[in-house]
Amino acid sequence: MKLSEEKIFSDSQIQNLISQNDYSSAADYLFNSQLKSWSLMKKNYSALKNIQTKSFWFEGMKLKVQFNPERIISTSAKVDESSISNRVCFLCMKNLPEEQKGISIRDDFILLCNPYPIFPQHFTIVSLNHIPQLISEYFGEFLEISKLLSPKHTLIYNGPACGASAPDHLHFQAGTRQSIPIENDIQQMKNDYGQIVFENESITTAFINDGLRSIIIIESIHQSLLEKSFSKIFQEFENVSSAEPEPMMNLLCTYDKEFGWSVIIFLRSKHRPECFYKNDPDKILISPAAVDLGGLIITPREEDFLRADEELLKKILNEVSLDQNTFSILAEKIKVGLS
C-alpha cells in the first residue's frame, strides 16, 4: 500500500536525516514536532513526567511498577475475535487521528508517535497493509527496524494472543533505550541463571530461568544466523503450544554497532493472570506484555499500583510464563536442532 501524502511528516531536515539512514534522529525530530502540534500527545507526555513508580529487587533483578492511568485502554483491550471484527482498526492509515503524522520506514511501515506513552519517547511502527500480527514471517523486518532505530531505541513485539491490542494489524513498538529493567540486567542474568544451548564465534543462544520468567536470549552480529536460530525456536515452541494463531511470545530487541543484535524472547503459557478476570475488590488489572515481562509493570489503576508487592508480581509473572518443565524440554530440543 502506498503511504498517503497527508500522513507523511516531511521537511528538509527530516529528509536529510532519512537520506543519511539516521532514523533514530529522524524519530527524535518527528517526536519533538508532534509534541508541539498535537495537544493530546503533549498532555499525555507531560503527565508521564509526574507518574508514580516503585521498585522491587529479586536476587539482583529489578522490577519497576508504573502507575499510568492513560494505559487503561491498552491494558483492558478486548482482543477476542468478535470484539476485533466489530471495531474499526485504529492502526489503519485512514483511521489515524488527524493530527498524527509519521515517517516512512522500509517502504512498508510507518513510524508514529504513540500518544499514550510508557517511555519518555514511545513509538508505534505500523505496517501499511492490514495484515495479522504474526512474527514468523516478519522477524527479519523486526531486526532491520531495530537496527535503523538504534542506538536510542529498543524495539518491542507483542504476540497476537499475549499483549497486542491490535492483533489484526502488524505492528511493533519502540521505546527509549534502557527504560526496561531487563535491558540492564540481562547479561548478569545470563551469567547467574542462563544455560547456553548453542554458541560459536558468530552467535549465542541461551535459556534463562530466573524464577520469574522463561527467557531466551539470542545474540549475534549476523542477521541470517539470528533468523535461523529464531526460526528453530519458533518451530519447536509451536510443536508444544496449543495457542493460536502463533505460540505465545513477546520480544525485545536492541542493536549495537560493535556487538550486533540482542533479542530477548519471553515464552508464555497464557495471556492474562486469573486476578485480571476477578471482580473487585479481588481484581488486579495487570495484563503482562513485553514491557511488563521486561520488568516494567504497568498498572492503570491506582488501587492495583498500591497493592503491587513482591509476592503479587512474582505470582503474576510465574502464572503467565511458560512452565519450567516445558521450558527445559524446549532447551534440549533446540540444543539438538541448532548443533
Image: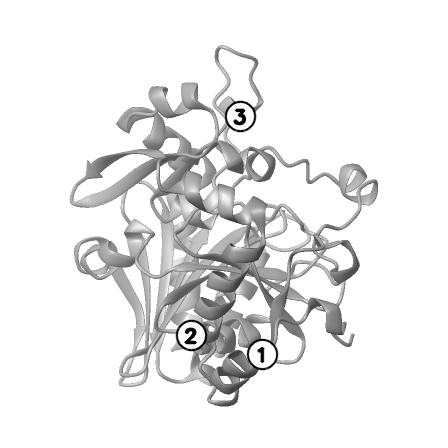
Q: Would residue 276 be seen by someone viewing this image from the given angle?
A: yes
How far apart are labels 3 and 2 at the CA level? 39 Å
Asked if 73 appears above or below 237 in the picture, the reply is above
* Residue plotted at (43% across, 38% down): 47
What residue would you read off at disc 2? 25
Query: Which label's residue is closer to the chain start, 1 or 3?
Result: 1
Quadrant in which the C terminus appears? bottom left
x, y percentage for residue 36?
51, 56
On-image quarter of the N terminus = bottom right
Task: From the viewer's side, name the closer residue of 162 and 94.
Answer: 94
Q: Position of residue 64 (x, y in %)?
A: 30, 39
Q: Is residue 92 left or right of residue 300?
A: right
For residue 81, above or below residue 330:
above
Cα distance, mark 1 to mark 3?
Answer: 45 Å
| Quadrant in the rendering for residue 10 | bottom right
Q: Which residue is mark 1?
A: 11
Which residue position is annotated with label 3?
276
Q: Residues within 10 Å of mark 1 (few under 14, many from 20)?
A: few
Kindly give the residue lying farthest to the right in the view shown. 86
